[in-house]
Image (cartoon, grey):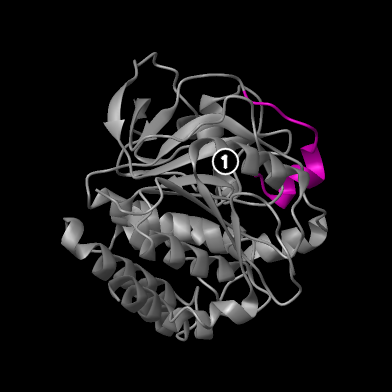
Amino acid sequence: MSGGPELCCVVTTIQEPTACMKRLDLELAKIGGRLVVVGDTKGPRNYELESAELVSIAGQDQLGFALAKLLPKAHYARKNVGYLLAVRRESACIYETDDDNAPKPGWRPRSHTTRARPVCVDGWFNVFSAFTDERIWPRGFPLHLIGEPSCRDPRDETGTRSLDSPIQQGLADVSPDVDAVWRLVLDRDFRFAIRPSVWLAPGTWCPFNSQSTWWWPPAYALMYLPSNCSFRMTDIWRSFVAQRCLWELGHGVVFHGAEVDQDRNRHDLMDDFRDEIPGYLGNARIAETLEALPLKSGAAHVGDNMLACYEALIARGDLPGEELKLVSAWLDDLAG
């Protein structure tokens, strides 16, 4: 039984509390949850919310984590420090989000065991198609497969069942997490239909992000965000590594309908497009590389399997060799 908080939420930000974070704070206060706010070089200086603890850029170096001193500054991967702190405090569940996501009415902590409809597709599955009939796809989904009928929900009316899943992703309404192509061509306020959650069986690929994601201890090691890639790819490439390693535990990722409304921070869409080019060109091949790896089954091998995945991405040229030093520091800090 964990001696830490039942729920720890982790965000990284340079802003004072946004309206979305004030809304999240109200929900966390109801359940005794804690909010770890990982700052960066631009701030924030204060974060005066009831449930919040601000870990400044200077304070991060004092936590004793080897990774904190290796992470680049002014980078989303600083969020890794928040994960490590939540794990050190023996949090029973870690929820991660961003400062532009507001919990919807009815938002509540989720359970490791949940009801979901199994989806078993050999290859890629556009999970958004399980929650809408409109043309939309998640950030990181291979562009050349968007129109493939085999990647859409077959709607075979399979019933839900109780499933264990240590990684669960909630979708976002209003401004879903899509790529720059969708925003440049089709952008509008968007809301998903209320439909049953889905569980992707091992062997079924779909990217997930860091916007409203629930993690439980069997998957904590897989939270690591790589540093030596673009901001728009760090959580997506992490999701591919995490899924591949999760399969060796006999688990798949669960996707829930929208549980937050995103009031999206300002973005330059052409900058987003530029940062997503490595994914447009490489995501499908990354998945093929990871799927071909001879990983080992069982909880004892999660760290070694994750390390093998990053070694493969380095060998492929997707990440530089220096990423391995950070992955090793992450695993050492977890073992610490």
Residue at 51 percent across and 82 percent down: it is: 62
For mark 1, give the secondary structure: helix
How many numbered marks appear?
A: 1
* Nearer-the-camera pick, 99 or 229: 99
Amino acid type at mark 1: Ala
- Expressed as whole percent of the image width and height from the top left, the position of residue 87 reads 38, 61
Quadrant of the rendered structure where residue 326 is? bottom left
Is residue 165 shown to the viewer in this render? yes
Q: Is residue 23 above or below residue 223?
A: above
Asked if the stretch drawn in magenta spans residue 254, the answer is no
* Nearer-the-camera pick, 212 or 312: 212
> In what quadrant of the picture does the C terminus appear?
bottom left
Q: Is 121 placed left or right of 190 in the picture?
A: left
- Expressed as whole percent of the image width and height from the top left, the position of residue 129 reads 55, 28
Residue at 34 percent across and 68 percent down: it is: 309
* Nearer-the-camera pick, 117 or 299: 299
Q: Is 265 placed left or right of 135 in the picture?
A: right
Residue at 25 percent across and 70 percent down: it is: 304
Quadrant of the rendered structure where residue 312 is? bottom left
**Crowd rating for badge 1 (residues with CA inside 10 Å; few <14, some 14–19, many 20+):** some
- Expressed as whole percent of the image width and height from the top left, the position of residue 176 reads 67, 39
Q: Is residue 127 above or below residue 43?
A: above
Is residue 281 shown to the viewer in this render? no
- Expressed as whole percent of the image width and height from the top left, the position of residue 76 reads 62, 67
Give the magenta part as a residue range. Answer: 177-192
Asked if the stretch drawn in magenta spans residue 191, the answer is yes
Residue matched to label 1: 29
Residue at 82 percent across and 54 percent down: it is: 266
* Nearer-the-camera pick, 290 or 208: 208
